[in-house]
């Protein structure tokens, strides 16, 4: 585990998600109130995946505990101090001032619910708003309003060195939080992306150009640059509007920058040489990719197709058999992508004979067991 000069641990999105999900899950299963878990502050550059991490934590809690996890996303940059405390009004006999409860405190206290209050962009909020967050992060109250006992508090923000809108966090607030710095990790992102429905062309391009996942540089003034967030938006355009990258180029360039978009558009030509996935998963494909780019494209296309047929052992077996002649690195990549389809999916793969054949060739079987 690395540490920064801020004296805090540095984790990938996946590592942070795993350790926080496990921490909350164990506490909940042991009957420990979430209010006893320190509030967490996630630091990181723009678009690195902090918001996605919180949503993933919620899904993990639901899966592991059987409870319903509800995320309340509060962008503190848009708040004034009074927005957190509520609007003042008179009591019934007009003798005292009372504060109407803000929407963020309207949470279900039911024991079958786990609330997650996500205070995003906290470092971009004016210090007056950060001061109002003091009570939320430690005392779990603002004025006369109190968070329910079933509420987890997670905050996130950009670092001052990122040159984003960011105010230095007061020491008094910083000492009330558990700090984690989130760093960009292609491997962690790809594991999430395979399962999350990211477009095959985006998956393939970034597999062969891993350095293009993160293009943020605080030293320049680019408005459009590559981040996991902007690539997710590119994927959404290709999945839901038009997957012709050439036609979508202006929009893609507006998300990841012109230089990266041009390279992406040029690379996409390799998809013309990818075999039909229906043939691959039916066991009748004869075309075999040979170049590095076509191999990356084929593996990404297979990974995306496998999402929809992952419970069909015959089709998955055909696809694994097709990959027998791939170079070892690409066999290993395909197996890693398949395992990422579901947390327990490797147990399903173990019942497919072709899986062991491919895993053994890929060097992931040692001493008779699959690593």
Image (tube, grey):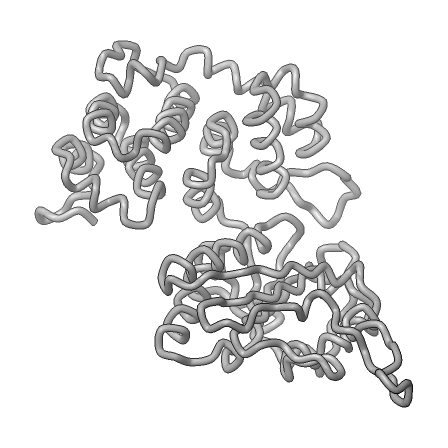
Residue 167 position, x and y percent, is 78, 66
Question: In the drawing, does residue 298 fall left or right of residue 46?
Answer: left
In the image, 329 versus 370, the foreground residue is 370
Can I make out residue 22 in this image? yes
Which quadrant holds residue 323?
top left
Say which residue appears at 65% left-offset and 54% top-offset: 45
Q: Residue furthest right?
A: 94
Which quadrant holds residue 326?
top left
In the image, 359 versus 314, the foreground residue is 314
Q: Is residue 25 above or below residue 368?
A: below
Q: Is residue 135 above or below residue 43?
A: below
Residue 299 position, x and y percent, is 36, 27
Say which residue appears at 18% left-offset and 35% top-offset: 355
Which quadrant holds residue 256?
top right
Q: Residue furthest front?
A: 93
Say which residue appears at 76% left-offset and 54% top-offset: 164
Q: Residue furthest bottom?
A: 95
């Amino acid at each position: 585990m690395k540490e920064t000069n801020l004296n805090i641990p540095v984790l990938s999105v996946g590592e942070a998600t795993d350790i926080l999900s496990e921490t909350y899950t164990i506490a909940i299963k042991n009957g420990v109130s979430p209010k006893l878990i320190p509030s967490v502050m996630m630091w990181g550059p723009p678009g690195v995946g902090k918001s996605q991490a919180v949503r993933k934590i919620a899904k993990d809690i639901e899966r592991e505990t059987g409870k319903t996890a509800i995320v309340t996303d509060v962008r503190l940059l848009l708040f004034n101090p009074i927005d957190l405390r509520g609007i003042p009004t008179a009591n019934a006999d007009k003798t005292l001032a009372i504060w109407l409860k803000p929407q963020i405190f309207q949470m279900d206290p039911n024991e079958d619910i786990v609330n997650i209050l996500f205070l995003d962009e906290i470092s971009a909020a004016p210090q007056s708003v950060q001061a109002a967050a003091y009570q939320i992060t430690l005392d779990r109250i603002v004025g006369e309003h109190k968070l329910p006992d079933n509420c987890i508090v997670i905050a996130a923000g950009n670092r001052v060195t990122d040159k984003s809108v960011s105010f230095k966090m007061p020491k008094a607030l910083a000492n009330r939080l558990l700090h984690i710095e989130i760093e960009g990790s292609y491997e962690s992102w790809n594991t999430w992306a395979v399962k999350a429905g990211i477009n095959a062309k985006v998956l393939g391009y970034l597999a062969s150009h891993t350095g293009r996942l993160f293009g943020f540089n605080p030293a320049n003034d680019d408005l459009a640059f590559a981040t996991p967030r902007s690539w997710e938006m590119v994927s959404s355009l290709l999945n839901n509007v038009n997957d012709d990258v050439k036609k979508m180029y202006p929009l893609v360039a507006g998300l990841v920058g012109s230089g990266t978009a041009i390279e992406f558009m040029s690379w996409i030509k390799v998809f013309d040489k990818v075999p039909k996935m229906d043939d691959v998963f039916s066991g009748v494909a004869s075309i075999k990719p040979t170049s590095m780019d076509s191999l990356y494209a084929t593996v990404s296309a297979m990974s995306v197709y496998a999402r929809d047929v992952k419970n069909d052992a015959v089709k998955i077996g055909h696809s694994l058999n097709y990959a027998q002649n791939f170079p070892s690195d690409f066999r290993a990549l395909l197996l890693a992508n398949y395992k990422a389809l579901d947390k327990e999916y490797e147990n399903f793969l173990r019942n497919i004979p072709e899986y062991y054949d491919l895993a053994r060739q890929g060097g992931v079987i040692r001493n008779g067991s699959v690593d």
